[in-house]
Amino acid sequence: MITLNELKTNYLNIATAEVTYDVQLTTFIATATKSIEAYCNQPILQRQHLEYYVLQYTYFAGLPFFGTPFSLTSLEGTNSLTGDDWTAYGVAEYVVIQTDGTYLYDFVGTPKKYLRLTGLVGWTVANMPANLKEACGRLCLELVRRSFINPTGSTLGVDSVNTSTPVGTTTVNYVPIIDEVADWLDAYKIAVI
């Protein structure tokens, strides 16, 4: 959600050339991103998304990502799930309508019974909304605060890693969402039905 250089310069006030803690800081960014996506109940950082549907009508509604960009890369259909005979729909075979945060696919004629929808969902780091970047940066600061002993005079104020409650690549997958960050994220949170 933010780059390593953004974390260093905008939140930690250290030179981008300082690489001693890059692995841990990169892990903190990934951890904060996972926590934000879990809190919002939707993907935020752009990724490939794949869904399968069984179609009973000439239309269906899918992809309920309310605050997240989505671009369809392919819509394919097949009459059975027993083989790998997926074929792409042509542009004239369906219309996509976005209504209330859900994409409605309306087919011309009779669609195939099974659908496979592939697309990109979420923002790229370069296009991430400012409040989501800020939330990620603040959560990374929280991880730095929890993870490092803070003696004076060293890079990041770090002499050694706190081993009693380590945060790293294998120990912690999420950081709790602190109140000030929750306020920034509420606009992107969707209800789980």
Image (tube, rainbow, N blue to C red):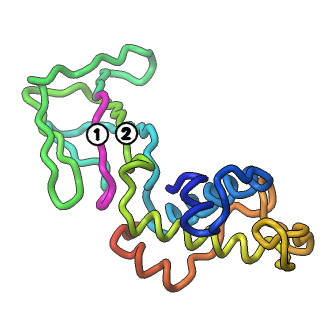
Label 1: which residue?
Answer: 71
Above or below residue 140? Residue 64 is above
Which residue is at 28% across, 29% downward? 75
Local SS, label 1: strand
**Closest to the observer, 156 or 97:** 156
| Residue 193 visible in the shown view | no
How many labels were placed on the picture? 2
146 sits to left or right of 183 = right
The three-letter code of the residue at mark 1 reads Ser
114 sits to left or right of 147 = left
6 sits to left or right of 151 = left
Label 2: which residue?
Answer: 120
Above or below residue 35? Residue 20 is above
Q: Are marks 1 and 2 in contact (CB under 8 Å)?
A: yes
11 sits to left or right of 62 = right
Q: Per the image, is 161 magenta?
A: no
Where residue 98 appears, x then y in whole percent?
A: 16, 50
The three-letter code of the residue at mark 2 reads Leu
Q: Which residues are magenta?
A: 65-74
Which residue is at 42% across, 37% downward? 50
Where residue 164 appears, x then y in whole percent?
A: 91, 74
Where residue 23 appears, x then y in whole percent?
A: 75, 50
Which residue is at 63% across, 68% downward? 13
| Residue 102 visible in the shown view | yes
Query: Mark 1: few, some, or many residues within 10 Å (few <14, many ≥20)?
Result: few
Mark with earlier residue (1, 2): 1
Where residue 69 appears, x then y in whole percent?
A: 30, 50
**Closest to the observer, 112 or 73:** 73
